[in-house]
Amino acid sequence: MLPVHELESIQMMSFRLRVAMCALLFAFAGCSSIGTPFESGNELHVRVEQKPSPGAREQKYPVTVRIAAYVDARSGVDPRQVGISNARILGLRGKQIMLDRDVAVLVGEVMQKQMDDAGFQVLAADAKNAQFQLNGSIKTLSVDIKERDYRNIVVESTLTEVASGKVIWSGLVAEKKDVYAGSSGNTKQDVAAYLHNGLKIVATKTSESILSVMMSARPDLFGLDATIKPVQGVTVRAAALPSAAAPVTATVAGVAAELHTGALVLSSAPTRAKVYVDDVYYGLTPLRLDLAPGIYPVRMELEGYQSATEKVSVRSEDHTELEMKLHK
């Protein structure tokens, strides 16, 4: 039998070893809500925090929105599959990268979180007292780990007024990125974070565009004058705008206030044509835009008429008018 002091020494070493192992595991598994390589199962665990994000709007707008189920419109893909890996990822086995739940469920959760952060009052999906409903479909969603780390997400969303069924906003948001292999990391946690970041970008652009259009369509809810603020990277398919004949003013996102802009006043015959500048939808004619100096391609479309395209030069602190006649 070992002496008492040697036995105590061995027990202390064993205890310290167990403490060190626990600390190591905690360092990997206890620091992130996104998911860790030590979580059980051969799946990605993307966790959406319930608490408000940093910078979230604290005072909610008097607008209630319910988030209906999103639809996975990808063809021939398992509803939980998010990509393919040709590289070793710590915590995952095999080439298929799978989520722990359906992709559509995750997208709905991210959209709900971002709409709440943007200041909307988000209600349950079956809430009867919601003013508006947001739903949509996932056209593309993949995170492929190959010679580079690829991310490709395309989500279409629609906001409707619950009482009337009227479409207030409908748009398509695409987020595509690729980085050097391993730049986003090579663990299960890193892949989950890479996917979550892309979804958050899509949801943020969606909420920003919706908020801008709603402030124009229903300024009474916000105590504001009608104004449109386009969001870069969002293709607006439809938007409910004020029916007043006076031009609606739009300020281009990303143009700093101190820059000297020029006014572009657009009209069409017939009126109420959709206006696209650099393939970004701004509203219906008549329309006034404050743009940074430069040359812009302008396209107008009206159902039943041929689209018209023309380039126009905007000069600093100057006033430019453009009228397009649309032909059947």
Image (cartoon, helix red, strand yellow):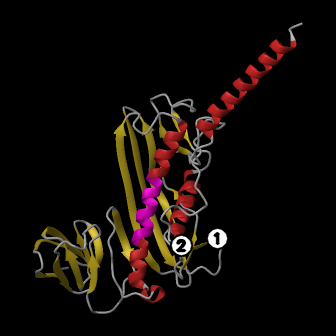
- Whether 203 is among the magenta residues is yes
Q: Secondary structure at mark 2?
A: loop
Q: Position of residue 148 (x, y in %)?
A: 36, 35
Picture quadrant where residue 116 is located: bottom right
- The residue type indicated by label 1 comes to Ala
Which residue is at a point 49% across and 55% down the rendered structure image?
Answer: 73
Q: Earlier in the sequence, mark 2 or mark 1?
A: 2
Disc 2 and disc 1: Cα gap in Å? 20 Å
- Kindly report the secondary structure that dominates the magenta region of the rendered protein: helix
Residue 259 disc label: none
Q: In which quadrant is the N terminus drawn?
A: top right
Closest to the observer, 247 or 223: 223
Q: Position of residue 265 (x, y in %)?
A: 18, 83
Labels 2 & 1 near each other (Cβ < 8 A): no
Q: In which quadrant is the C terminus drawn?
A: bottom left
- Determine which residue is flagged by label 2: 58
Q: Position of residue 36 (x, y in %)?
A: 59, 39
- Determine which residue is flagged by label 1: 124
| Residue furthest front as drawn | 5
Q: Nearer the viewer, mark 2 or mark 1?
A: 2
Which residue is at a point 40% across and 87% down the rendered structure image?
Answer: 224
Q: Position of residue 127 (x, y in %)?
A: 65, 75
Neighbourhood count class around disc 2 (C-alpha, 10 Å): few under 14, some 14–19, many 20 upward:
few
- The residue type indicated by label 2 comes to Glu
Residue 145 in view (yes/no): yes
Q: Which residues are magenta?
A: 198-209
Asked if 229 appears above or below 45 in the picture, the reply is below
